[in-house]
Amino acid sequence: MPPIPVKPGPYKFYAHIIGPPALLTAREHAIDHGLPTVTDRPLPHPLDTLHQEWTIEPLERGLPGSPYVIYLGAYAEEETQNRTGLIVVDHKVYANTVPRDQLTKFIFEPGLGGLQIVDDKDHLALRAGHLGQQIEAVTPNKADPHQVWTLHSPIGL
């Protein structure tokens, strides 16, 4: 199936795992390749939620079907060289401040009840295990609910 176009802008990514609502979250302490991304409950403090808001931007603006890059935080569209975004290293997902061309490029594909977020280069899907587990990049499996995500625009876009 062809990729699904996503409107650029700020989103929260909800994982389809058993239990309370779980959001894609960047941890506050960096390790080898950046901030580990995990699933966590919605954080109540507004400053904490900055680690749970992400901005989706097309790699090539104005080019239909272009893959997307995903940045940490609800940024306005600005041309800054280095912003914290998602990267995949050794099948693990991190948030790191690297040049835009080093960010992992993603496409969105249909999943059961939501979307699969797939690495455009290696064609690996983001998978949320249990609450608190680091997000992994795995071979896509449409039947695995842990590979399905729901995007929610916190500002009502």
Image (cartoon, helix red, strand yellow):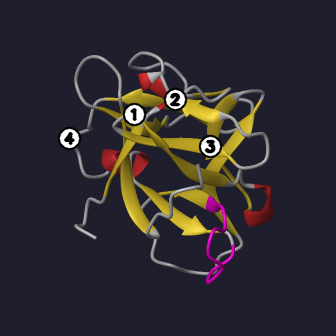
User: Is 23 above or below relative to 55?
Assistant: above
- Residue drawn at point x = 71 percent, y = 72 percent: 81
Please report the bounds of the magenta region as a residue range. 60-68
Which of discs 3 and 1 lies nearer the camera? The answer is 1
Mark sitting earlier along the chain (2/4): 4
In this picture, is 121 found above or below 19?
Answer: below
Quarter assignment of residue 62: bottom right
Mark closer to the chain start, 3 or 2: 3
Q: In the displayed image of the protein, which residue is found farthest to the bottom?
A: 62
Mark 3 crowdedness (10 Å alpha carbons): few <14, some 14-19, many ≥20? many
Query: Cα distance, mark 4 to mark 3?
Result: 29 Å
SS under mark 4: loop
Q: Are marks 1 and 2 in contact (CB under 8 Å)?
A: yes
Distance between the alpha carbons at the discs numbered 3 and 1: 14 Å
The three-letter amino acid code for the residue at tag 4 is Pro
- In space, the residues marked 1 and 2 are separated at their CA atoms by 7 Å
Residue that badge 4 annotates: 44
Determine the residue positioned at 72% across, 40% down.
Answer: 123
The residues bearing labels 2 and 4 have C-alpha atoms spaced at a distance of: 32 Å
Of pointers 4 and 3, the one earlier in the residue sequence: 4
Neighbor class of circle 2 (other Cα within 10 Å; few <14, some 14-19, many 20+) is some
Badge 2 is on which residue?
Answer: 142
Secondary-structure class at tag 3 = strand
**Mark 1 and mark 4: Cα distance apart in space:** 29 Å
**Image side of residue 116 versus residue 83, left or right:** left
Q: Which is closer to the viewer, label 4 or label 3?
A: 3
Residue under label 1: 112
Horizontal and vertical percent position of residue 118: 62, 43
Quarter of the figure with the C terminus: bottom left
First of labels 3, 1 by sequence position = 1
* Element class at badge 2: loop
In the rendering, which numbered label is found on residue 118? 3
